[in-house]
Amino acid sequence: MSIRKFLTSKTFLIQLAIAFGIIVVLGFALLKFLDVKTNHGEEIPVPDLSKMQVVIADEKLKELGLELLLLDTVDFRKDMPPYSIVEQSPKFGTTVKNGRKIYVKVNSGGYTDVILPDFKEKTYRQISANLKSMGLKEGRITYKKNMAKDVVLSLTQNGKTLKEGDKVKKNSVVDFVLGDGKEVFDQSDMILESEEEQLPDEFR
C-alpha cells in the first residue's frame, strides 16, 4: 500500500481521531490538575487576625496560601494585647486570590514617654491644650494663693512635683496647681519703707 493510500485510508483516519482524542483528554486533565494544585480561580476568605501575635498570624495565612506583610507599629492601645495585630487589609471576611498579601499593623508594647514643656507661669488654657495634644490627660485642679488667676504654678503626678523636661507616660494623668488671683499686692510696707528712708538718722 502506498503512503498516499494509507493517509487517506479509513484505518489511518480512525487512528488519527483516537490520537487527537487522547491529546484533548490529557490536556484537559493537566489543566484540571494545575487548577487544583495552584488554587487557580479559588476565592479564599481572609481570616480575622485581630489580637493575634504576628508569628501565629503568619503561620495561619501560610496554611491558606496567603502572605503576611507587616506595615507599621501603632501607638499603644490598652484594649489590645501588646505586640498584637490591631489592623489588617484586606479586612476579615474579604475573599482574595491565592498568594495575596495581607497587610497588618501591630500594637506597641506600652505607652511611650513624652517630655514636659516649660509650663511655669503660663496660662492654664495654654498648657492644658498643649498637654492634651501630647496625649496626656488632665487630672485634679487645685488653687493656691497667688496674684495671677489661672496661671500654672506647678504640675504633679501621683503626688510628685514635675518640672520642665521630665518624662511621663502618654495617656497618664497630670494634676494642675493654679493661681487663684486672690492675693492682693500690699503697697503699705513699701510706702513706710520709703518714708523711713527720708527721715534723718536721729529720728529713725
Image (cartoon, rainbow, N blue to C red):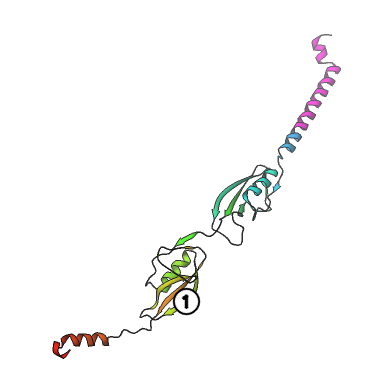
Q: Which residue ends up furthest to the bottom in the rendered image?
A: 203
Q: Residue furthest right?
A: 11
The quadrant holding residue 178 is bottom left
Q: Main secondary structure of the magenta part?
A: helix
The count of marks equals 1
Q: Position of residue 71 (x, y in %)?
A: 56, 49
Position of residue 158 relative to residue 197, above or below, is above
Among the 4 quarters of the image, the one containing residue 118: bottom left
Task: Give x and y (percent) for residue 38.
Answer: 71, 38
- Image quadrant of residue 197? bottom left
Q: Residue furthest top?
A: 1
Residue with the mark numbered 1: 141
Mark 1 nearby-residue class (10 Å; few <14, some 14–19, many ≥20): few
Q: Is residue 144 left or right of residue 137?
A: left
Residue occupying image coordinates x 81% and y 21%: 16
Position of 11 compared to 85: left or right?
Answer: right
Q: Looking at the picture, does residue 37 appear above or below residue 52? A: above
Residue 15 is covered by the magenta coloring: yes
In the image, what residue occupies the spot 19% across and 87% down?
Answer: 196
- Where is residue 146 drawn, in percent x and y? 37, 80
Residue 189 % position (x, y): 26, 86
Q: Over which residues does the magenta segment extend?
A: 1-30
The residue that appears at 16% across and 86% down in the rendered structure is 198
The answer to whether 104 appears left or right of 155 in the picture is: right
Instruction: Please name the residue shown 75% across and 34% down the image.
Output: 33
Does 65 appear in magenta? Answer: no
- Type of the residue with mark 1: Ile
The one nearer the camera, 21 or 108, is 108
Which sits in the foreground, 91 or 2? 91
